[in-house]
């Protein structure tokens, strides 16, 4: 086998432009930071990790074509990327046909399994379930759902509706807007929220529409009290776009925030500050991309193999002391054991952790194990950082 055949090549599938560019640039920087660190530490199998990049621009067809190009023209079978679920679904058949592996560092709606995908972001039992318990306990029973109109928000709301009902809550509105909302789209959705008078808004709006929606809602309520917005996808990248004044008081859920107080988190934040361009934010999804790249490199170095089956089997028995805490991949479903943290955004735009799971939560993408009682117990067990 030639030296070139023994080089780890990873095809990155993150957009530099388009509706989700801010968050995908953050993920890409996380992945590249991990590769750079691994290369400084001696590389993989004695050679530098090679990362291939392109700009699929948030368009599912372009993710599929980029992935196909990596496979056909560059001999790459290991991919890391995708943010929106319809982009992952576009890439999935290409990765499956090539019998490759896609590392997917993003929260998603669950109810999926592919032997060729390693899910590195939370499924609903790792973010929606603790959030529903937290919101009904601290904010009230009436929730309005607002989402972008594609698969993740609709499926995610399906699960959240069920969870809210379990807690005795009520969904008083469910409204969707296009991924690129017009001023009219925003105004209509905001009016529906105001009329429904919820205690809290659960937002599954993604990308650039996030800042526009938060701003439109804040403007509509003016100086009066307004319901807080809780989200699984709003991150430091979207907070920077909307500004701290609009973001203040809203609620976010993720496995990681930069305020996590551990040596691994501090080292990650310093490394990101030195490596990321000034306009790229450190986010939970950059942390997920970073950790997945490190786990992949660790697996290839430990096994001495670039074979997909060997790497995947190693992942099931390995773990990583990541910035969020110790994580590993669950053999039963290829999803990751991850922490859950609920934070509130303060007046300076920083995320203050209000609750965190005492341990990494086992992934249950088909929600077969968890029920309300599990979550009540787990909420009591967690606490502020
Ligand atoms: C998403 O579409 N999974 C954020």
Image: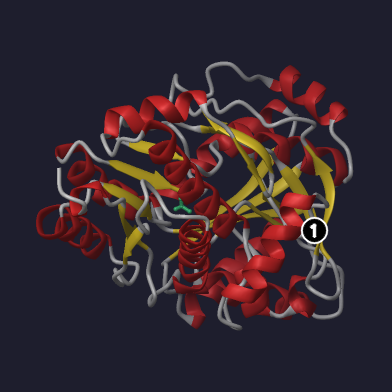
67 or 129, nearer to the observer: 67
Residue at the (42%, 58%) spot, across then down: 149
Residue 48 screen position, x and y as percent: 37, 59
| Residue 261 can be seen in this image | yes
Q: Residue furthest left?
A: 72
- Residue 209 in the image: state x and y as whole percent: 52, 72
Task: Give the vertical position of 246 relative to 13 (above or below).
Answer: below
Q: Is residue 224 above or below residue 199?
A: below
Q: Could one spot residue 105 in this view of the protein?
A: no
Quarter of the rendering containing residue 239: bottom right
Question: How is the protein colored in the picture?
Answer: secondary structure
How many numbered callouts? 1
| Secondary structure at numbered mark 1 | loop
Tell which of 309 and 260 is nearer to you. 309
Left or right: residue 51 versus residue 200 is left
Q: Position of residue 26 (x, y in %)?
A: 53, 67
Task: Name the residue beneath numbered marker 1.
Answer: 259
Nearer to the camera, 19 or 288: 288
Q: Residue at x 46, y 47 (%)?
A: 154
Task: Look at the picture and state if 41 lies above or below 381.
Answer: below
């Amino acid at each position: 086998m030639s030296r070139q055949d023994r080089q780890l090549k990873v095809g990155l599938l993150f957009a530099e432009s388009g509706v989700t560019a801010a968050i995908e640039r953050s993920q890409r920087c996380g992945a590249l930071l991990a590769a750079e660190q691994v290369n400084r530490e001696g590389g993989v199998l004695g050679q530098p990790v090679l990362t291939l990049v392109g700009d699929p621009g948030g368009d599912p067809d372009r993710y599929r074509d980029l992935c196909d190009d990596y496979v056909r023209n560059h001999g790459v079978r290991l991919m890391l990327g995708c943010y929106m679920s319809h982009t992952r679904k576009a890439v999935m058949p290409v990765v499956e046909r090539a019998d490759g592996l896609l590392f997917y560092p993003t929260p998603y709606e669950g109810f999926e399994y592919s032997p060729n995908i390693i899910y590195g972001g939370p499924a609903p039992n790792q973010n929606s379930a603790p959030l529903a318990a937290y919101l009904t306990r601290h904010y009230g029973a009436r929730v309005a759902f607002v989402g972008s109109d594609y698969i993740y928000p609709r499926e995610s709301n399906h699960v959240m509706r069920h969870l809210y009902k379990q807690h005795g809550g009520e969904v008083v509105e469910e409204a969707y807007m296009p991924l690129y909302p017009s001023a009219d789209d925003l105004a209509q959705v905001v009016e529906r929220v105001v009329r429904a008078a919820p205690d809290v808004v659960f937002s599954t709006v993604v990308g650039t529409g996030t800042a526009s929606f938060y701003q439109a809602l804040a403007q509509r309520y003016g100086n009066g009290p307004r319901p807080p917005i809780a989200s699984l996808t709003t991150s430091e990248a979207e907070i920077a776009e909307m500004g701290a004044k609009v973001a203040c008081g809203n609620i976010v859920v993720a496995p990681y925030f930069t305020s996590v107080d551990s040596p691994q988190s501090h080292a990650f934040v310093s490394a990101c500050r030195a490596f990321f361009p000034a306009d790229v934010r450190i986010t939970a999804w950059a942390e997920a991309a970073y950790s997945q790249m490190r786990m992949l490199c660790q697996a290839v170095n430990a096994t001495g193999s670039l074979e997909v089956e060997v790497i995947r089997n190693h992942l099931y028995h390995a773990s990583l002391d990541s910035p969020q805490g110790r994580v590993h991949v669950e053999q039963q479903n290829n999803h990751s054991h991850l922490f859950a943290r609920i934070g509130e955004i303060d007046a300076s735009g920083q995320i203050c952790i209000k609750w965190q799971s005492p341990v990494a939560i086992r992934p249950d993408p088909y929600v077969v194990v968890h029920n309300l009682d599990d979550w009540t117990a787990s909420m009591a067990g967690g606490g502020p950082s």
